[in-house]
Image (cartoon, rainbow, N blue to C red):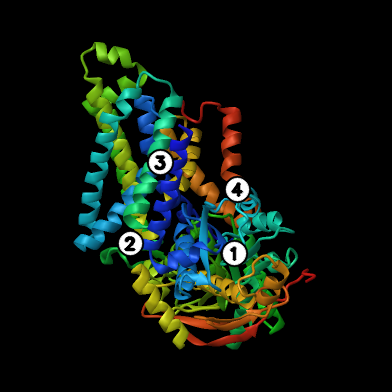
Amino acid sequence: MDLSLFLVQLLNGVQYGLLLFLIASGLTLVFGVMGILNLAHGSMYMIGAYLVYYFTTVTDSFFLAVVIACAIAMIIGIIIERFLITHLYQRDHLDQVLLTVGLIFIFNAAQGFIWGNDPLGVDVPSILSSSIQLTDIVEYPVYRLFISVVCIAIAVAMYYVINHTKLGMMIRAGESNREMVEALGVDIRKLFTIVFAVGVTLSALAGIVSAPIVSLVPGMGERVLISCFVVVVIGGMGSIKGAFVAALLVGIVDTFASVLLPGMSSMTIYLLMAMILIFKPQGLYKS
Amino acid sequence: MLKNTSKIRKITVAASIASSFLLSGFAVQAADKEPIKIGVMLPYSGVYAGLGEAATNGLKQAIRENGNKIAGRPVEFLLSDTEAKPARAPELTSAMTDKDKADFVIGPVHSGVAMGMIKSIRGKDSIMIIPNAGINAATGAFCQPNVFRTSFSSWQTAYPMGAEAVNMGYKKVVTMSWNYGFGKESLAAFEESFEAAGGDVVKKIFIPFPKTEFQSYLTEIASIKPDAVFVFFAGGGSVKFVKDYEAMGLKDKIPLIGSGFLTEGTIEAQGEAAEGLLTTLHYADSLDNPKNKTFRSQYQELYGKPADLYAVQGYDAGQLVIQAVEATSGNTADKDALIKAMESAQIDSPRGKFHFSKAHNPIQNIYLRKVENGENVVVKTAASSLDDPARGCKL
């Protein structure tokens, strides 16, 4: 592998990792703050992708569709938290798993009912549809770089909100001691609604921005969910920083493994997870 | 008390006779003949639900065109959702053969399910007709007297492309697919004819199924710079692959060719990126023959959407049942006679006429197709009356 090829592959890995981070960040945020294990997280990724498909065809503008789809995803998040999740705070994880698995079935049925089972695609918005010449033969699509920029922007925004704002302070406090936060007069219910809605919207946003480079098929959410859990477990359940590092690690390892160890590439990220858990049973960054 | 009950029973019997006379003449006629039981084992949920639905539609259209009867007997469909899960196949198949005593079992879409079904149907009285699953072994090493296929073998859909690729001047080719049965068989068939014609497969890339993160592989292909790339992908994965291939700027520099499933039912989602792709398959929507035209317009009228390959294969399964049962004058008890009739059947399919090989696979034309304006257009017949080698079949 010469240097230019190595660099292109590294770019592939980082770009894939950043996208994984965007998907996983919402899951780990919701788990860290609320202790809720949302298995329907992947379904929101799917719903985001299908919503942006629908509104792109209706409005003829990808960017307008992104805004509408995000808004709808946030509303879905608020409804789910207010009417369903709210009953489960006092129960154990098994009940949460049951509810959120049920939601997966509901979302999948809704997707089949509304959009059918044929694969669908969203066109890359024309302003981002060009490519940059990297080597003599490889061009890199500008849209993929755009996705990376969005992911980095989200990561920076999350870092800022959590570490430098009052909301972030409450989130951090809620993570470490829920009862104390309530005793200090913070409306934890409202905080939970906000966090859940944001978590769900982040997942939908991942589906939205990746819609033009993936194919929209039934079950796309469950496939994402598995890589998402690998990232969250490696990073440490509930740790955003951990999710960021783990996502980049998984992205780069997966990319290079698929070229260097093609026969084993399907298991390398799980091997990576197993190795890390042997030495750090709580993941890289214990929340 | 006893008297009363018997009176009520008499009244009910009288009422039901009266009501059956009120129904259409067809129902009265049908009531005196045992229905032909057609078990249908297709996926109606999950990723392949669309394929299962299309095959069922096609099957029902064929029976309907025959007046909903075969040799004077009505038809009863027993639908069963395989969910495309191989683990469920043996149990569902046994229910069809032993409990429901189905005369025919039509299915499945998925090759893994097909293998499970074949194991369970071996030696049973029901006759299985595969309307899709292309795994070579179904009419190869695992072929059975009571198993027919109206679709294709993986080998058939990829083999003709090897010689075509050499014709187009490609000497050095990279092949790529998911690491699973259909993909591996397609790549092997391509390689067989490509290398026989003097080409060289410089690298084979197998990626884990159903992974769709292709960037690293495309980067590798770009560094190899082959004359062309032959792939097998289907469904959602093929949409993503074709779009990624174009977005990396490879499409104009390294031609992409493939087995026809690359552009089957996916062109709309692939958009511009699919334009100009060359693939081989036993059917094309735009195939210019009268049978295809009437089939497609009927289908559109009945179901309100365009027919596809899977509808054609289901339709031909229906045609095969009709021919066999009519040839035996409606006697479905004699399975050997039915099988004989099926072996000599001539199917007038929307894909062109075909008949069956000794191993019960269609001997059919394979077309070279090019995507033009969002449609698979037939360029030429890449192989006429192509017979699958049926390796390992002792029929």
Please tell me whether mark 1 sits on a helix, a strand or a loop.
loop
Q: CA distance from mark 3 to mark 4?
A: 22 Å
Chain at tag 3: A
The label nearer to you, 3 versus 4, is: 4
Disc 3 residue type? Ile
First-in-chain label (2 vs 3) = 3
Q: Is residue A230 left or right of residue B25?
A: right
Q: Is residue A89 left or right of residue B84?
A: left
Depth check, front residue: A152 or B234: B234
Per the image, the residue denoted by label 3 is A104
Please tell me whether mark 4 sits on a helix, a strand or a loop.
helix
Badge 1: residue crowd in 10 Å (few <14, some 14–19, many ≥20)? many
Disc 2 residue type? Val
Residue B353 sits above or below residue A283 on the image? below
Per the image, the residue denoted by label 1 is B133
Q: Is residue B116 left or right of residue A109?
A: right
Answer whether labels 2 and 1 touch (C-beta < 8 Å): no
Q: CA distance from mark 2 to mark 1?
A: 29 Å
Residue A257, horizontal then vertical, whole percent: 59, 51
Disc 4 residue type? Arg
Depth check, front residue: B372 or A112: A112
Per the image, the residue denoted by label 2 is A122
Residue B165, image quadrant:
bottom right
